Amino acid sequence: MDFVGKRIWFFVFSLIVILVGVVFLIISPGLKPGIDFTGGSTLRLSFENDVTQSQIRTKLTELGHDGAIVQKMTSGEEGNYFIRVGELQLPEKKSLLSSLQESLSPDGINELSFDLVSPIVASETVLNAFYAVLAAVIGIFLYIWWAFRNMPSPLKYGFAAILALAHDSFIVIGIFSMFGYLFDVEVNAMFLIALLTVVGYSVNDTIVVFDRVRENIILYPARSLRDNANSAIAESLGRSLNTSLTLLFTLLALMVFGGDTIKEFLWVLLIGVIVGTYSSLAIATPALFSWENRDFSKLFNR
């Protein structure tokens, strides 16, 4: 199969998906930052009486907590809810729980967990997240450039890998922007950790294909880069799909039997594994050929 020959279709498909994500990023609220990035308080409560999300949200608004996030927890007992409000000190938390119990659950409310993050800590988290992503990108580029230093134009391998990495990151962020707009899903530090994990997985898959390209160039120097690239993708296809399917089955098992606290992490990995497998085969190596074929310069010189 001529994977490289179909690169334009791959690029156009990815561009459309990314643009859809950008639209949702622009539409308010876009990517909804969670407590780790904005500060505030989160509570996980178990109501003894039957209550609904709208009843809890209405009562919180009456108590002055406009814009509170209320989500029904999918695991655990019936009546468990996740609530996020502004920063609460202990006396304020006790007053809030007392008011909720008095009006919504006279039989009692069990506090499952309570977390408080100050705005100062949240701003430091945002800054550290930026540094982590920047360090990861620079480190990956330098490593790939060094690993392929004996090949002609080793920089193109680094740029192609970073392009695939950016492709995966933008798609995952775009999908979570849709989740934020449609389902009020927030992103927190766990999202960032999962995103960096996806980046590592994507780069690992990409390097496997690039390494196969390098071997083919050494073994078959008379063949064109197009033929060597197509052979590398075909030879790596089975390995990439088997690895991804094994990981997907593991993640699905964790989705079913794991708790709510790791659901966001698992969703990012689930999406990232699929996108990363696609990009290593349909974006990174075709981009490598496009660099060699000067497709981008031809496009701008028209």
Image (cartoon, rainbow, N blue to C red):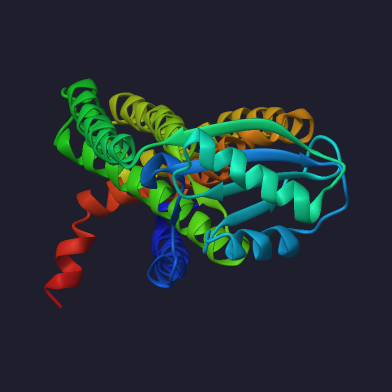
> As rendered, which of 121 and 140 lies closer to the eye?
121
Whether 61 is drawn above or below 190: the answer is below
Image x and y of residue 47, in percent: 80, 43
Tell me the residue at 52%/61% (across/down): 64
Image x and y of residue 227, in percent: 38, 44
Question: In the rendered view, does 108 fall on the left or right side of 33?
Answer: right
Quadrant showing the C terminus = bottom left
Image x and y of residue 288, in percent: 29, 45
Question: In the rendered view, does 102 fall on the left or right side of 163?
Answer: right
> As rendered, which of 264 and 231 lies closer to the eye?
264
Tell me the residue at 36%/26% (across/down): 211
Whether 125 is drawn above or below 302: the answer is above
Tell me the residue at 64%/29% (across/down): 247
Tell me the residue at 23%/21% (across/down): 147
Question: In the rendered view, does 37 fall on the left or right side of 234?
Answer: left
The quadrant where residue 11 appears: bottom left
Whether 281 is drawn above or below 251: the answer is below
Image x and y of residue 74, in percent: 77, 44
Number of numbered discs overlaid on the protein picture: 0
Residue lying farthest to the bottom in this orientation:
302
Regarding residue 97, the answer to whether it shows in the image is yes
Regarding residue 285, the answer to whether it shows in the image is no
> As rendered, which of 183 and 283 lies closer to the eye?
183
> As rendered, which of 203 and 269 lies closer to the eye?
269
